[in-house]
C-alpha cells in the first residue's frame, strides 16, 4: 500500500496518506483477518446477486491440482438485476476426498447449492466436459441432476468439443511428443544446461532468449511452445550439436527434413486452432457468439486444404520449410479428418437454433408460436421499431 501511495500521490497529501498507512497494524494475523473479511464480503455480494436472479446456469469441471488432490470447480452465470448485465463468477471449489465417481460429483454439487442457498429448480442448465463421471447415462452426475430437475438443459463444453475435433493422427502425435520431450529436455534436464541455453540464445541474438515449458493442462500451451521453438530452431540445432550424446540425438531429429515438415505443419495448424480457442474463451461470450465462432471456423478447413496444395499462404511455417515438390498428403489427411470431426459434432454445435437466430436477427424468424408469451411480446416490440 505504501508503494502504491508513493506512486499515485504527490505533495502534502502524499506524505499524510503514507503516514496513515504506516499506522495500520499489518502483522501476519491482522493481514489474515483482513483477507478473510474481504473474502467473506465478496461471497456475500455474490450470494445476494444470485438470490435475486430468477434463474442461473452452472458450469462444472473436475480437475487435479499439483498435489494430486481432486478439486471440483463450479461456475455460475446469471443476470444481475442491479447491474442490468449477465455476470459470471466462481461459485465455489470443493475437494473430492476419495473417489471422483458421478455420485461423488453429484453430491458435492448438491451440497454446494444447499450451502449457498440456491434452489435446484433455479438451475436451468449445466455445462460439463465429456467425462463418463459427468455424462454417464445412468450414474453420471448430470443424469442424477436431471432426475431431480427433468427440465434441466445439459450442454457439453463447446471448447472441449472443438479440442476433441482437432485430435492428432499417430504420425503427428509422435512428432509432437518428440518436440515436447526435446523442449522439456532443454528446459528441465538441468538448471546448468538451461542457463547455458539462455546465454547461448542471447549471444547469437536469437528471436527469443528462452523456450516455453509445455503445460499439458492448458489447451493453448502446445501451440505457443511450438511457435517459440520454431522461431529459434536453427539456434537450438547449433546448441544441441555441442552438448551431450542425448542432446546430439535430438539434434539429428532437427536435421530430418520429413520430421521438420511435420513440425512446420503443427506450428501453423495449432496457431489456427488456438485462434478459435481464444475466441471461445473470450469473457462474457453468449451462446450465440460461441456458435458463430465455431461456424465461421468450420468454413476454414476447406480453404486450408486447397491452400496446402497451392502456395500455402495460410501456412507460413510450411511455406518456409517445404521447398519444391514435397509430400503434403499427411497434412491434407489431417484437414480432411478435421472437416469430418466438426461435421460429426455439428448437431452439438447447433443447439437452440431458432432461439439463437431470434436473439441475433429476429427478422429471420417467421414462426414464433414455439416461444413463450414474454419472448413473443418482445419480438413484436423489437420489430415494431422498424416500421
Image (tube, helix red, strand yellow):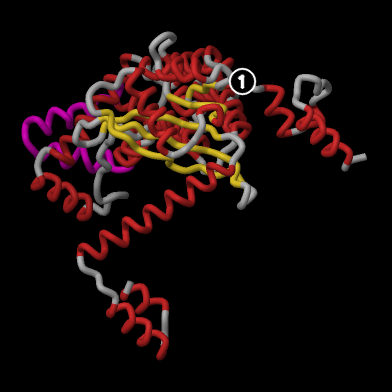
Residue at image coords 33%, 71%: 1
As for residue 253 lying within the magenta part, the answer is yes
Q: Is residue 367 above or below residue 206?
A: above
Quadrant in which the C terminus appears = top right
Query: Are there few (<14), some (14-19), or many (20+) residues within 10 Å of tag 1?
Result: some
Answer yes or no: is residue 233 visible.
yes
Please identify the residue farthest to the bottom as the structure is shown: 12
Q: Is residue 316 visible?
A: no
Residue 83 place in picture, x, y as percent: 61, 52
- Please determine whether, in this image, residue 134 is positioned above or below residue 378: above
In the image, the segment drawn in magenta is 231-259
Residue pushed farthest top?
A: 138
Work out whether residue 283 or residue 261 is closer to the camera in this orientation and state it: 283
Q: Position of residue 254 (x, y in %)?
A: 23, 30
Where residue 145 appears, as percent x and y from the top left, is: 47, 20
Of all residues, the one furthest to the right in this rendering is: 387
In the image, what residue occupies the spot 25% across and 73% down?
A: 25
Does 376 sit left or right of 273 as displayed? right
Counting from the top left corner in percent of width and height, residue 281 is at 48, 38
The residue tagged 1 is 350
Quadrant of the rendered structure where residue 107 is?
top left
Q: Where, by quadrant of the figure, is residue 222 drawn? A: top left
- Secondary structure under badge 1? loop
Q: Which SS does the magenta portion mostly show?
A: helix
Q: Residue at x 74, y 29 (%)?
A: 358
Along the line of sight, the residue nearer the viewer: 197 or 284: 284
Q: Quadrant of residue 9?
A: bottom left
Q: Can residue 181 be found in the magenta stretch? A: no
Q: Is residue 72 left or right of residue 43?
A: left
* 204 and 273: which is toward the camera: 273
Which residue is drawn at the image coordinates 17% and 39% (left, top)?
186
Amino acid at each position: 500500500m505504501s508503494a502504491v501511495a508513493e506512486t499515485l500521490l504527490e505533495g502534502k497529501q502524499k506524505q499524510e496518506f503514507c503516514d496513515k498507512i504506516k499506522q495500520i497494524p499489518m502483522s501476519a494475523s491482522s493481514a489474515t483477518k483482513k483477507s478473510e473479511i474481504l473474502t467473506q464480503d465478496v461471497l456475500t455480494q455474490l450470494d445476494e446477486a444470485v438470490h435475486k436472479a430468477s434463474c442461473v446456469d452452472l458450469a462444472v469441471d473436475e480437475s487435479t491440482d499439483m498435489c494430486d488432490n481432486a478439486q471440483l470447480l463450479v461456475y455460475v452465470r446469471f443476470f444481475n438485476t442491479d447491474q442490468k448485465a449477465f455476470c459470471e463468477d466462481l461459485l465455489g471449489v470443493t475437494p473430492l476426498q476419495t473417489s471422483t465417481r458421478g455420485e461423488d460429483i453429484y453430491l458435492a454439487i448438491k451440497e454446494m447449492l444447499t450451502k449457498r442457498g440456491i434452489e435446484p429448480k433455479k438451475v436451468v442448465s449445466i455445462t460439463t466436459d465429456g467425462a463418463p463421471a459427468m455424462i454417464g447415462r445412468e450414474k453420471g452426475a448430470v443424469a442424477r441432476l436431471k432426475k431431480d430437475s427433468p427440465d434441466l438443459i445439459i450442454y457439453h463444453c463447446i471448447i472441449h468439443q472443438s479440442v476433441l475435433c482437432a485430435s492428432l493422427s499417430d504420425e503427428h502425435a509422435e512428432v509432437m511428443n518428440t518436440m515436447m520431450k526435446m523442449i522439456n529436455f532443454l528446459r528441465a534436464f538441468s538448471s546448468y544446461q538451461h542457463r547455458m541455453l539462455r546465454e547461448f540464445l542471447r549471444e547469437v541474438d536469437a528471436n527469443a532468449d528462452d523456450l516455453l515449458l509445455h503445460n499439458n493442462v492448458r489447451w493453448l500451451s502446445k501451440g505457443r511452445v511450438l511457435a517459440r521453438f520454431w522461431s529459434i530452431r536453427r539456434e537450438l540445432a547449433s546448441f544441441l550439436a555441442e552438448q551431450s550424446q542425448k542432446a546430439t540425438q535430438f539434434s539429428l531429429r532437427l536435421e530430418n527434413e520429413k520430421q521438420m515438415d511435420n513440425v512446420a505443419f503443427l506450428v501453423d495448424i495449432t496457431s489456427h486452432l488456438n485462434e478459435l480457442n481464444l475466441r471461445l474463451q473470450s469473457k462474457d461470450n453468449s451462446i450465440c457468439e460461441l456458435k458463430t465462432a465455431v461456424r465461421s471456423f468450420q468454413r476454414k478447413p476447406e480453404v486450408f486444404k486447397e491452400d496446402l496444395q497451392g502456395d500455402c499462404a495460410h501456412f507460413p511455417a510450411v511455406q518456409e520449410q517445404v521447398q519444391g515438390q514435397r509430400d503434403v498428403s499427411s497434412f491434407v489427411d489431417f484437414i480432411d479428418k478435421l472437416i469430418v470431426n466438426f461435421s460429426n459434432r455439428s448437431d452439438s454445435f447447433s443447439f437452440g437454433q431458432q432461439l439463437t437466430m431470434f436473439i441475433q436477427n429476429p427478422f429471420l424468424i417467421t414462426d414464433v408460436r414455439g416461444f413463450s408469451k414474454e419472448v413473443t411480446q418482445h419480438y413484436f416490440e423489437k420489430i415494431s421499431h422498424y416500421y
